[in-house]
Amino acid sequence: MHDLGEPHNAATLSDQEIITGIERLVDAENKSAAYKYSLLAQFSRRGLNLKLHYSSPSHWLASGTRIAHGNAQRQFDTADWLAMWPTVLHALSNGDIHDAHAKAIHEGYDAIRKSDPTLSQESLDTAIADLLATALDGTAGQVKQRAQVLGHSAAADARARYDQAVRAREERERAQREAERKGHPSPEPEPDADSGDKGDEDDELLKTPPPQLVSENSALNTLDLYLQANGRTSIRGDVDKVLADKLRASLSPLSRPRPAPDGTRDPRSASKRQADALSQLLDQRSSTGHPRGEGIPPATVNVTVNLRDLLADRSSRTAGSDPDSDSDSATTEAESRRDPAPSMNDPDWPFDLEWTGPISHSLARLLTCDANLRPLVLDNNDVPLSMGSEVRLATPEQRAAVAVRDKCCIRCGMPAQWCQVHHIVFWEHGGPTDLTNLVLLCGDCHRLVHHHGWEVKFGDDGHPHIIPPATIDPERKPIPSFHRQRRPAA
């Protein structure tokens, strides 16, 4: 690896140094990607995640970096695949292709293999060589286009072989019936000097379902949601004819142009109308994923209020009701105890959605117009106050309060919707179903706490900390819950 220098020194470099520096960095980037994939493949092959008490390699990678679990899984998938195709890994390491090319070849390989699951290893080798040759002279997008062509060709060839086998079997059965009708013995199949018994080969081919056309193969369906830097989300998908038809049929009645009462044409583009239609379609389902009934609001809003602010507000109103008191000074004193109003980029900003993060105050007002409101009172450390219960399972209100405090799995950061509510002191050991005894853990981390020596305790700030076993950290130093940690970049 070359010495990269300091970014702020770039302005002092000569033209040639800038050109050379960029070329070296691109080359180093490719070599680093190849080396990273080699290390990830070895990590997965050796099962090091189990040594570190993680259920999967991707779970370990996601927990220590600021990347989503799906991103981590894709990295390990690519690493494991490259270990089986060293020609592609070698081209990446040499700088002949970029990381994006390698990923495109991997995705193309999966598409081709799913187009015809019966492809021989020799055919797959030929397809990879074709995609690699395309990558050497073209872009990652061109690699994907070439993979689509090869996948379609593979599916068409497989379908032709299947149809030929069907016709051959029908011909044999017809000949057999004709022979039986005439009282002659059934004709023996003629052996093929090159391929052996063709009838047995056809019968073997017909034991598997007929291959589907690429346009009708649901195994190739993908749908990805990407959160962008500006807070918006881009959607990218590739679906088969049936799913596309269902989607178009659902959106069509909702995406029709709607002229104004005076006959003015709908100014929205077709893309805008379809986006509006998708929003309407999702509005027809409740936040739990079930169809909404009449009168059921589309969302549930957690309204969090700090107890300090409630008491200050009550104090000011009580003082104001006394004619002998100075209401202005009481109000000023109450307001002076409050923290300055946070901005939208601050961690204390109170308006956010579960999946996509902070939203503006105006959008929050819009959403709360037609929603269930669930009030939660927080203490001075922003921890929901006790909502104890005699029952074992946390109530929906308690789960909401735990989610407000923990936000995600306290160990690995899995979304709250995928987590379980864990009793720190086990319920069967007398532990109460109370917020001071409940935390969010995903299924994998929950098993670690129950069976592998991990522990949970609350800190002085009222938030949970996770404690690793001595085999991981001999000092057993408590680790703050996931959303309160400062984690390194990926």
Image (tube, helix red, strand yellow):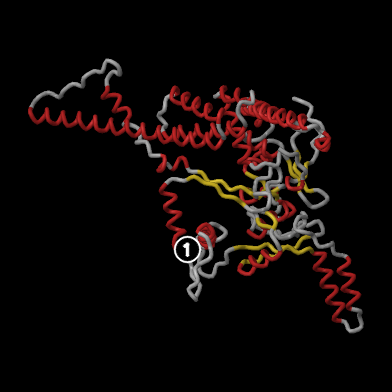
Identify the residue shown where x is 84% and y is 69%. Answer: 312
Quadrant that contains the N terminus: top right
Mark 1, other Cα within 10 Å: few <14 / some 14–19 / many ≥20:
some
Q: Is residue 148 left or right of residue 300?
A: left
- The location of residue 80, given as percent across then percent down, is 58, 28
**Amino acid on which the number 1 mark rests in the picture:** Leu
Q: Is residue 424 above or below residue 173?
A: below
Identify the residue shown where x is 76% and y is 55%. Answer: 345
Judged from the image, the secondary structure of the residue bearing numbered disc 1 is helix
- Of residue 371 and residue 32, the one placed in the foreground of this image is 32
Q: Can residue 180 be seen here?
A: yes
Q: Can residue 392 be seen here?
A: no
- The location of residue 432, given as percent across then percent down, is 71, 53
Q: Is residue 73 left or right of residue 439?
A: left
Q: Which residue is tagged 1? A: 254
Identify the residue shown where x is 43% and y is 45%. Answer: 240
- The location of residue 458, given as percent across then percent down, is 78, 48
Quadrant that contains the C terminus: top right
- The location of residue 169, given as percent across then percent down, is 24, 30
- Of residue 258 and residue 481, the one placed in the foreground of this image is 258
Where residue 45 sits, quadrant-wise, is: top right
- Of residue 374 and residue 110, the one placed in the foreground of this image is 110
Direction front: furthest residue:
15
Direction left: furthest residue:
182
